[in-house]
Image (spheres, helix red, strand yellow):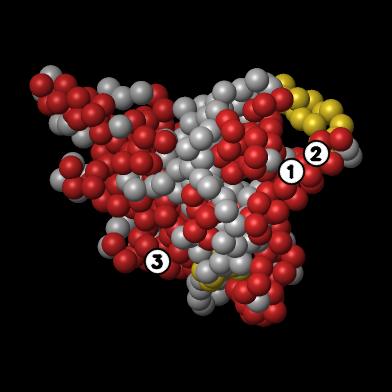
């Protein structure tokens, strides 16, 4: 701790000079581009030093975190540069979610940027059974940077206050600032009476910028990060799941699911308006596979769109006829092909149910219902049904869930 304090204080008196690029930071490495855009003033505060020590002790920017960032970071950096924003904002998902798109807080915030349902809707992030924009790395990045830009504008370009508002809410920061000014304070972030989480959050973002600027000084190894896009958006109009797409393009399925975290991986891509993000290496293979598949497997898109969301899952499990009796306003699925497909899925579901075995899953910190469903290859609705959870209920760390896993 003494050594860390000395190192930290050494760089508190002046802006941090960039260290020479190491072996993992050759020309064209994204870290160089990030360093060039770091703009936060170096602030001699014990709060920042404490967060710097905490990041190093808890390995909050370890190689694993950096590897999780790799698919998304180039896109985020591009968006930050396009808006002329401080590059420290590109590192914010490391603090918010550890670059885990399925991370979910106890308050229900989710995604790389941790939008709550209400805030997500306010910023145009659609949320439904088929798609959740809060987990979409592209849509959520654009929404987060738009929101942060707005917050900075509300506080006359003060990024410390903007970050505090992103964490605690703009109303709470405004109230704390008014109270500070009324009591003779300067109204700056460091003098505000804010929740402990927020008082740690802003210094943590500053400290993370220090680490990226001076990795050698703090003994942090930065993983090579190519300065080019890691994916290409591909429009997929067929009745395919992400699992099938991964197989067709010879891609790692888990990596594809994380890259497309906004899409429900358990359902086919039925006329989703969101393109599938495909790692560069698999684009040509996927396009070839789609061309070979042909138009014969395309869905009757207009009919299926009417039956989208949770209701379609009900149709798949309970069969079309029963659904029509239970809900007279349900869509009329006159297509023989669609009815046959629904019946096929119902038979498959019955067969799978007969082969399941009971498991008890204890929820870990940061896990969401969707992540658990993906791990066991079951629908989230089934987990809710097995555990008497209401639609939309989250899960909490330590909660024991009954899972009927395929044998």
Tag 2's secondary structure? helix
Tag 1's secondary structure? helix
User: From the viewer's perspective, is 403 left or right of 20?
Assistant: right
Q: Residue at x 82, y 36 (%)?
A: 353
Residue 34 or residue 261, whichever sits in front: 261
Q: Residue at x 51, y 64 (%)?
A: 275
Q: Are marks 2 and 1 in contact (CB under 8 Å)?
A: yes
Where's residue 198, x and y in %?
37, 30
Q: Earlier in the sequence, mark 1 or mark 3?
A: 3
Q: Are marks 1 and 3 in contact (CB under 8 Å)?
A: no
User: From the viewer's perspective, is 22 left or right of 294?
Assistant: left
Q: Quickly name the residue at label 1.
A: 346
Calculate the distance from the C-alpha at mark 2 to the C-alpha at mark 1: 6 Å
Tag 3's secondary structure? helix
Q: Quickly name the residue at label 2.
A: 350
Where's residue 144, x and y in %?
36, 49
Residue 153 or residue 295, whichever sits in front: 295
Residue 109 or residue 245, whichever sits in front: 245
Q: Quadrant of residue 83?
A: bottom left
Give the crowd class for mark 2: few <14, some 14-19, many >=20 residues within 10 Å.
few
Q: Quickly name the residue at label 3.
A: 78
């Amino acid at each position: 701790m003494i050594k860390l304090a000395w190192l930290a204080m050494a760089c508190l008196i002046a802006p941090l000079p960039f260290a020479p690029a190491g072996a993992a930071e050759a020309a064209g490495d994204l870290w160089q581009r990030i360093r060039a855009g770091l703009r936060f003033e170096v602030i001699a505060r014990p709060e920042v030093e404490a967060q710097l020590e905490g990041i190093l002790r808890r390995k909050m920017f370890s190689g694993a975190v950096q590897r999780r960032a790799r698919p998304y970071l180039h896109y985020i950096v591009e968006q930050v540069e396009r808006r002329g924003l401080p590059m420290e904002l590109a590192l914010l998902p490391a603090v918010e979610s550890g670059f885990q798109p399925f991370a979910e807080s106890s308050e229900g915030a989710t995604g790389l940027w941790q939008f709550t349902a209400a805030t997500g809707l306010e910023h145009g992030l659609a949320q439904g059974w088929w798609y959740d924009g809060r987990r979409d790395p592209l849509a959520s990045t654009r929404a987060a940077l738009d929101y942060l830009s707005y917050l900075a504008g509300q506080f006359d370009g003060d990024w410390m206050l903007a970050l505090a508002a992103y964490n605690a809410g703009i109303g709470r920061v405004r109230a704390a600032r008014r109270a500070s000014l009324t009591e003779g304070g300067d109204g700056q972030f460091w003098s505000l009476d804010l929740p402990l989480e927020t008082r740690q959050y802003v210094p943590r973002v500053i400290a993370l910028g220090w680490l990226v600027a001076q990795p050698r000084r703090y003994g942090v190894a930065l993983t090579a990060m190519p300065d080019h896009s890691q994916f290409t958006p591909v429009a997929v109009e067929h009745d395919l799941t992400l699992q099938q797409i991964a197989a067709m393009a010879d891609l790692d399925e888990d990596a594809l699911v994380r890259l497309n975290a906004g899409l429900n991986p358990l359902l086919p891509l039925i006329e989703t308006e969101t393109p599938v993000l495909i790692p560069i290496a698999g684009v040509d293979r996927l396009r070839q596979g789609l061309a070979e598949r042909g138009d014969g497997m395309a869905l009757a898109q207009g009919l299926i769109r009417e039956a989208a969301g949770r209701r379609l899952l009900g149709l798949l499990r309970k069969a079309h006829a029963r659904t029509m009796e239970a809900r007279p306003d349900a869509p009329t699925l006159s297509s023989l092909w669609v009815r046959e497909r629904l019946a096929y899925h119902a038979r498959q579901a019955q067969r799978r149910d007969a082969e399941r075995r009971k498991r008890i899953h204890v929820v870990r910190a940061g896990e969401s219902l969707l992540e658990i469903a993906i791990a066991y290859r079951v629908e989230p609705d089934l987990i809710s049904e097995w555990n008497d959870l209401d639609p939309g209920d989250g899960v909490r760390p330590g909660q024991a869930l009954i899972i009927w896993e395929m044998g």
